[in-house]
C-alpha cells in the first residue's frame, strides 16, 4: 500500500508516522522540505490514499489527485480511522474562542480525574495522540475549517460550533464555503451524539439541520444554559455570578457556557465545576495581562487573529485604549473593525501587510491622522510607545504569517520587547 502525505509540518509528520505504523509506504511531499509536488505527480497512479495537510490550498497537485479520483483526506480523518473507538471525542470549532474552550474542557476533565489529551489546531497532531495508544477517556479536539474540509467518517460524541464570523477569505470563494466546512464537524453524528447549539448565532441557527441531541446556550435568550443579569443559569436555576469567574469579558462568558454544557452532558459534579470556573487561569496570548508599569497595563492578545475577535477585545474595556493592530491580509472587510477603532481607540499603531489598508479606511472615517502611527513592525511600534494610557492592547485582528511563524511567536516577541523597554 502506498500513500502520499502532502505537507511536512507537524500534522504531516504525524500522519506519515501513523501510516507507516499501519503498513503504508509513504511518500512525503513538500515543496520546501521534501519531494516537490511537481516531482510527485509521477507517483499519483500508484497511490491508495492522499493525506493533505490543512494549510495547503487546493493547488494544481491536489486538483490532479482529485481528477484521478484518489481518496483525499486530512490528518484528522486519518487519525480517527486508527483511533481506539472506546475513547470519546469532544470536538470544537468556530471562528473565535476555540483554543480557550478546548483548553478549559481538557483541564476540567483532568480536574475530575479523567484521562484526557487535547490535539488538533491547538498545535498537537491528533495522529500523535493515536500513535501513543494510551488508555484515555476523552480526546478534546480543536478543529479549524481547514481540518474539517475532507471529513469522511470522523464522528465526535460532543461537537460544537462556538460562533461564525467572516474569516479566511483568502482561502475560500465565499462565506458559505467557509461556514459549510465548519459544519462538517457533526456530519456523521446521530441521535446518540450531542451538539451544543449557540442560539444567538443566526448563521449557525440557519444552517443547523441534524437529528442529534442538543444543549442550547445563549447570552441573550433563555436556553438550557444562559446568561442574564450578571448570572449564568443552568435549566433556569441561578448558578454563578460573572464576578466570580476567573476568565473575564463577555466573550469568555460565551466560552464558559459551552464548558458548562459539556459538564452537564457528562454529568460532572456542579460544585467541582464551580470551583474550577472560579480558579482557572487565563491562556497565554489571549487577553493576557502580562505587565503593568505605573498606570499602564499591557495586554497581549496575539491570539486575536480575526476582525470579530479584536472587536470583542476592544469592547471589553469601558475606557478608550491604545491599540496595536494589523497582520496578514486575509481579504476580509476591515470597515467594521475601523468603525470600532474610531469609537473606542484613542491612538492606533499599525503593523503588517494591512497597515496601509487600515490607515486608508480610518482616514476615510475621519479618524484623526495624528492618532494613526503606521510603523509596519512590532519593533518600531515598541520603540515609539509611551506610557500614556491605562490600557495598551496588542490585538492584531489578522494572522501572523506575513511577519512571524505563528501567533505564539508574535506574542512572545511583543512581550519580550515590552519588558526589555519598560521593565
Image (cartoon, helix red, strand yellow):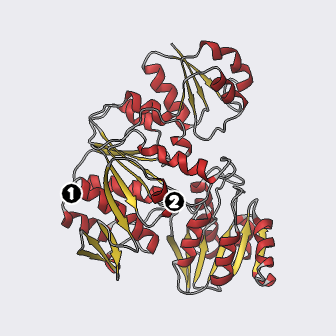
Residue at the image point whose x is 26% and y is 34% from the top = 86
Tell me which numbered mark, 2 or 1, is placed earlier along the sequence: 2
Pick the residue in front: 372 or 184.
184
- Residue 86 is left or right of residue 373, and the answer is left
- Residue 134 is left or right of residue 351, and the answer is left
Position of the C terminus, as image quadrant, is bottom right
Say which residue label 2 marks. Answer: 203
- Residue 22 is left or right of residue 348, and the answer is left
User: Is residue 248 shown above or below 207?
Assistant: below
Q: CA distance from mark 2 to mark 1?
A: 30 Å
- Residue 23 is left or right of residue 54, and the answer is left
**Residue 416's x, y, as percent?**
60, 64
| Snapshot quadrant of residue 296 | bottom right
Say which residue label 1 marks. Answer: 268
**Residue 143's x, y, as percent?**
48, 47
**Residue 53's x, y, as percent?**
58, 35
Residue at the image point whose x is 31% and y is 31% from the top = 84
Task: Tell me if residue 376 can be seen.
Answer: no
Neighbour tally class for label 1: few under 14, some 14-19, many 20 plus, Cα within 10 Å: some
Residue at the image point whose x is 61% and y is 52% from the top = 406
Q: Secondary structure at mark 1?
A: loop
Residue at the image point whose x is 75% and y is 69% from the top = 358
Pick the residue in front: 155 or 244.
155
**Residue 123's x, y, as percent?**
50, 46
Neighbour tally class for label 2: few under 14, some 14-19, many 20 plus, Cα within 10 Å: some
Circles 2 and 1, Cβ within 8 Å, touching? The answer is no
User: Is residue 216 shown above or below 15?
Assistant: below
| Snapshot quadrant of residue 356 | bottom right
Q: Secondary structure at mark 2?
A: helix
Pick the residue in front: 213 or 99.
213
Amino acid at each position: 500500500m502506498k500513500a502520499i502525505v502532502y505537507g511536512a509540518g507537524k500534522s504531516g509528520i504525524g500522519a506519515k508516522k501513523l501510516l507507516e505504523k499501519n503498513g503504508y509506504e509513504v511518500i512525503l511531499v513538500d515543496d520546501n522540505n521534501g519531494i516537490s509536488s511537481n516531482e510527485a505527480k509521477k507517483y499519483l497512479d500508484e497511490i491508495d490514499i492522499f493525506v493533505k495537510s490543512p494549510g495547503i490550498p487546493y493547488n494544481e497537485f491536489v486538483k490532479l489527485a482529485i481528477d484521478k479520483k484518489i481518496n483525499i483526506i486530512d490528518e484528522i480523518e486519518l487519525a480517527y480511522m486508527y483511533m481506539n473507538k472506546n475513547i470519546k471525542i469532544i470536538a470544537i470549532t468556530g471562528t473565535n474562542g476555540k483554543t480557550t474552550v478546548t483548553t478549559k474542557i481538557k483541564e476540567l476533565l483532568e480536574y475530575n480525574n479523567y484521562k484526557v489529551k487535547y490535539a488538533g489546531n491547538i498545535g498537537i497532531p491528533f495522529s500523535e495522540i493515536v500513535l501513543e495508544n494510551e488508555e484515555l477517556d476523552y480526546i478534546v479536539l480543536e478543529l479549524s475549517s481547514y481540518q474539517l474540509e475532507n471529513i469522511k467518517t470522523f464522528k465526535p460524541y460532543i461537537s460544537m460550533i462556538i460562533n461564525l464570523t467572516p474569516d479566511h477569505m483568502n482561502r475560500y470563494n465565499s462565506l458559505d464555503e467557509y461556514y459549510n466546512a465548519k459544519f462538517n464537524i457533526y456530519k456523521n453524528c446521530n441521535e446518540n451524539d450531542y451538539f451544543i447549539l449557540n442560539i444567538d448565532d443566526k448563521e449557525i441557527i440557519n444552517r443547523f439541520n441534524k437529528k442529534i441531541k442538543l444543549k442550547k446556550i445563549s447570552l441573550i435568550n433563555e436556553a438550557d444554559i444562559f446568561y442574564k443579569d450578571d448570572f449564568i443559569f443552568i435549566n433556569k436555576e441561578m448558578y454563578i455570578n460573572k464576578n466570580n469567574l476567573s476568565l473575564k469579558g463577555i466573550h469568555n462568558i460565551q466560552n464558559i457556557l459551552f464548558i458548562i454544557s459539556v459538564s452537564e452532558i457528562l454529568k460532572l459534579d456542579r460544585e467541582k465545576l464551580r470551583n474550577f470556573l472560579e480558579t482557572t487561569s487565563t491562556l497565554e496570548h489571549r487577553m493576557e495581562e502580562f505587565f503593568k508599569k505605573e498606570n499602564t497595563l499591557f495586554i497581549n492578545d496575539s491570539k486575536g487573529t480575526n476582525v470579530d475577535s479584536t472587536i470583542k477585545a476592544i469592547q471589553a474595556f469601558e475606557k478608550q485604549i491604545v491599540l496595536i493592530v494589523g497582520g496578514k491580509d486575509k481579504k476580509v472587510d476591515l470597515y467594521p473593525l475601523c468603525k470600532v477603532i474610531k469609537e473606542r481607540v484613542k491612538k492606533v499603531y499599525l503593523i503588517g501587510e494591512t497597515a496601509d489598508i487600515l490607515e486608508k479606511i480610518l482616514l476615510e472615517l475621519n479618524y484623526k491622522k495624528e492618532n494613526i502611527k503606521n510603523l509596519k513592525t512590532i519593533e518600531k511600534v515598541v520603540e515609539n510607545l509611551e506610557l500614556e494610557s491605562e490600557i495598551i492592547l496588542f490585538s492584531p485582528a489578522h494572522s501572523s504569517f506575513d511577519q512571524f511563524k505563528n501567533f505564539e511567536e508574535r506574542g512572545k516577541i511583543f512581550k519580550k520587547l515590552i519588558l526589555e523597554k519598560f521593565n
